[in-house]
Image: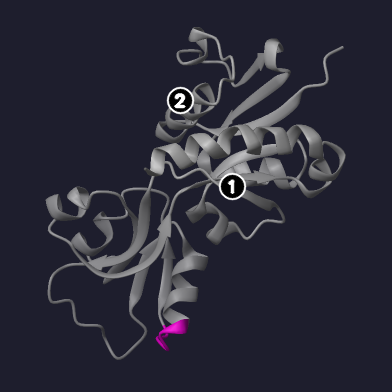
Amino acid sequence: MNSFLTIAMPKGRIFEEAVELLRKANFQLPPEFDDSRKLILEVEEENLRFILAKPMDVVTYVEHGVADIGIAGKDVMLEEERDVYELLDLKISACYLAVAGLPDTTLSDVAPRVASKYPNVASGYFREQGEQVEIIKLNGSIELAPLIGLAELIVDIVSTGQTLKENGLVEYARIADVTSRLVANPVSYRIKEQRITEIVERLTPVIESLKR
């Protein structure tokens, strides 16, 4: 029986960029890997098993040991604060967390409302600024909140800024830069250190070459 190393991967754009990175590091991933709708994919040639998950769930799978390693956005790690090792900045899916709202937004003397799918990041940021705010957790279409009067500000991921612009919003503050990171379960790292280190060593020169 093969001793698979299990990797949790986020669906969507990060998955596509991560697969390209792995291929450049000479991991033999079959062509059908890109189009499969399966949630668990095994690559026997590399003794790797991939679990495809929602981006927010990757660090949960890694923390609980159902995945040995995973690829997670720094935004998720800041929000979730899971017990995982951060091994490598993959330098892919670059974006940032920002505070935004309608132009000329004036905050009320009473606690302003801030909508976000990152309530911990948002509350931590405003606490550091000495601002007391009410956090409203949303799971999507965060830009709607100021437009319909649900909140005065939002904290959300910004890539190009086009979505903010199209909805008439402006950026007020940049909180943190975000890229995807390779993370590991602490127990798996001890037990499978050699295999995990090998993956890090194969990926590192590829990442360095992309920075040039």
Relative placement, left or right, of 25 versus 12 is: right
Q: Name the residue at 51% across, 21% down.
A: 23
Tell me if I can see residue 67 in this picture.
no
Query: Mark 2 and mark 1: span between their CA atoms?
Result: 16 Å
Q: Is residue 130 above or below residue 173?
A: below
Observer-nearest residue: 5 or 87?
87
Q: Which residue is mark 1?
A: 88
Q: Which residue is mark 2?
A: 20
* Residue 211, image quadrant: top left
Q: Amino acid under label 1?
A: Leu
Residues packed near mark 2 inside 10 Å, few (<14), some (14 to 19) or many (20 plus): some
Mark 2 and mark 1 residues within 8 Å of each other at the beta carbon: no
Q: Amino acid under label 2?
A: Glu
Relative placement, left or right, of 195 versus 86 is: right
Which secondary structure, mark 1?
strand
Q: Is residue 26 above or below residue 171?
A: above
Q: Give the extent of the magenta segment.
A: 128-132
Q: Is residue 64 above or below residue 23?
A: below
Observer-nearest residue: 100 or 142?
100
Q: Looking at the picture, how far across and down is residue 49, in whole percent? A: 69, 22
Query: Quarter holding the C terminus?
Result: top left
Q: Is 16 within the magenta?
A: no
Q: Looking at the picture, how far across and down is residue 172, in whole percent? A: 24, 72
Relative placement, left or right, of 24 versus 80 is: left
